[in-house]
Amino acid sequence: MKKEISQINERNKRVELDKAWETSKTRRAIISIITYVMVVLFLYLIRAPYPFLNALIPMIGFIFSTLTLQMFKKIWIKKLYKN
């Protein structure tokens, strides 16, 4: 019984850490930087004009999408529990 409780507690800790990572600013920053670098490389390889400037567009889009997702999640949860 104690072993099962211990396993459940360990699982809960892992789930909490995963959730914290998914919503962390660190994760968003890392994904944004990786996105920016990959788009710069792609634009540079295809010889697009101003790759460093143009690569900001998808990075900013990603940041805005992650910021608005929380708002939409709250609306969705409210709607779900009203019914």
Image: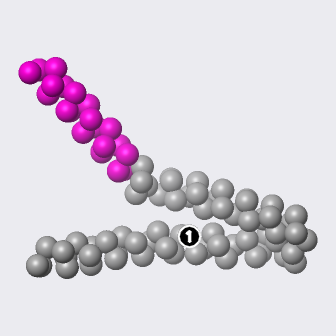
Q: Residue at x 47, y 69 (%)?
A: 66
- Where is residue 56? Give x, y as percent: 69, 73
Tell me if 40 is positioned left or right of 22 in this view: right
- Where is residue 26? Give x, y as percent: 50, 53
SS label for mark 1 = helix
Query: What's the magenta region?
Result: 1-20
Query: What sort of colour scheme is used for the picture?
Result: one colour
Q: Residue at x 66, y 56 (%)?
A: 34
Q: Splitting the image into 4 quarters, where does residue 46 fall?
A: bottom right
Give the tally of numbered discs: 1
- Where is residue 81? Give x, y as percent: 14, 73
Q: Residue at x 67, y 76 (%)?
A: 57
Q: Which residue is mark 1?
A: 62
Q: Residue at x 73, y 71 (%)?
A: 55
Helix, strand or loop for the magenta stretch, by majority: helix
Amino acid type, label 1: Phe
- Where is residue 28? Give x, y as percent: 52, 59
Vertical relation: 16 (above or below) 23: above
Residue 27: in magenta span: no
Q: Splitting the image into 4 quarters, where does residue 2 fall?
A: top left
Vertical relation: 22 (above or below) 74: above
